[in-house]
Image (cartoon, helix red, strand yellow):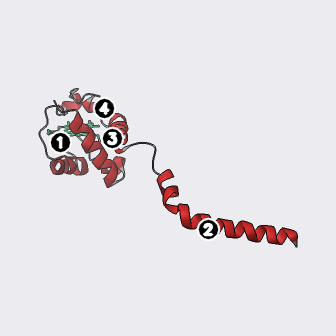
């Protein structure tokens, strides 16, 4: 009987703590990587083989990203559909959010 009451109290404590800290729990669940870090690591993984870490490599005839003047929208279109020797990247980047992170990253390569 004593044991049952103990579990009942635990149950109550669980209920009240859920009500109060649910927002701080969500904050704890945020990814450790910032969007900028994510963009940089996705770029290193998927783009440097042709573009190089600084965007200037020009492998397979790739455009120099430090000289690129394209808008976010134009970049997104190339990432989605590919262009000439550049294959489409949407399947590799997986999500729209990842694509946006990469776009923000390559704009930091501009001089
Ligand atoms: C297989 C080699 C290859 C890979 C991998 C690659 N690219 Fe490209 N990229 C190219 C080539 C080639 C072009 C030039 C296309 C053209 O205009 O003929 C290009 C062009 C671009 C352009 C247009 C630049 C401009 O000003 O015209 C952007 C932006 C770009 N790539 C971004 C990326 C990003 C971001 C990734 C990784 C997610 C990536 N590329 C991966 C080969 C590659």
CA–CA distance in space, label 4 to label 1: 17 Å
Residue count near mark 3 (Cα–Cα under 10 Å), binned few <14, some 14–19, many ≥20 = some
Instruction: Name the residue carrying label 4.
Output: 48
- Residue contact at pointers 3 and 1, CB within 8 angstroms: no
Instruction: State the CA–CA distance, disc 4 to disc 3.
Output: 16 Å
Q: Which mark is residue 36?
A: 3
Q: Residue 78 versus residue 95: which sits nearer the camera?
A: 95
Residue name at image x 46 percent, y 43 percent: 32
Q: Nearer the viewer, mark 2 or mark 4?
A: 2
Which one is in front in this view, the residue at disc 4 or the one at disc 3?
3
How packed mark 4 is, by other alpha carbons closer than 10 Å (few <14, some 14-19, many 20 or more), is some
Kindly state the secondary structure of the residue where label 3 is placed. Answer: helix
The quadrant in which the C terminus is found is top left
- The residue at label 1 has a CB less than 8 Å from ligand 1: yes
From the top left corner, tell me how far across and down residue 52 is, in percent. Answer: 27, 28
Which badge, 2 or 4, is on the more N-terminal residue?
2
Q: Residue at x 74, y 69 (%)?
A: 9
Crowd around label 2: few <14 · some 14–19 · many ≥20 (10 Å):
few
User: Is 1 above or below relative to 50?
Assistant: below
Upstream in the sequence, badge 2 or badge 3? 2
Marking on residue 16: 2
* Relative height, residue 75 to residue 19 (above, below): above
Residue furthest left in the image: 69
- Residue at the spot x=33%, y=37% of the render? 40
Q: Which of the marked residues, 4 or 3, is nearer the chain's N terminus?
A: 3
């Amino acid at each position: 009987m004593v044991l049952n009451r103990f579990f009942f109290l635990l149950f109550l404590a669980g209920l009240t703590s859920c009500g109060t800290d649910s927002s701080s729990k969500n904050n704890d669940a945020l990814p450790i990587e910032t969007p900028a870090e994510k963009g940089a690591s996705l770029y290193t993984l998927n783009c440097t083989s042709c573009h190089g870490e600084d965007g200037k490599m020009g492998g397979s005839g790739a455009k120099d990203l430090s000289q690129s003047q394209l808008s976010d929208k134009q970049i997104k279109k190339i990432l989605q559909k590919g262009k000439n020797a550049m294959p489409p990247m949407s399947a590799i980047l997986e999500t729209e959010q990842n694509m946006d992170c990469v776009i923000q990253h390559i704009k930091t390569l501009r001089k």
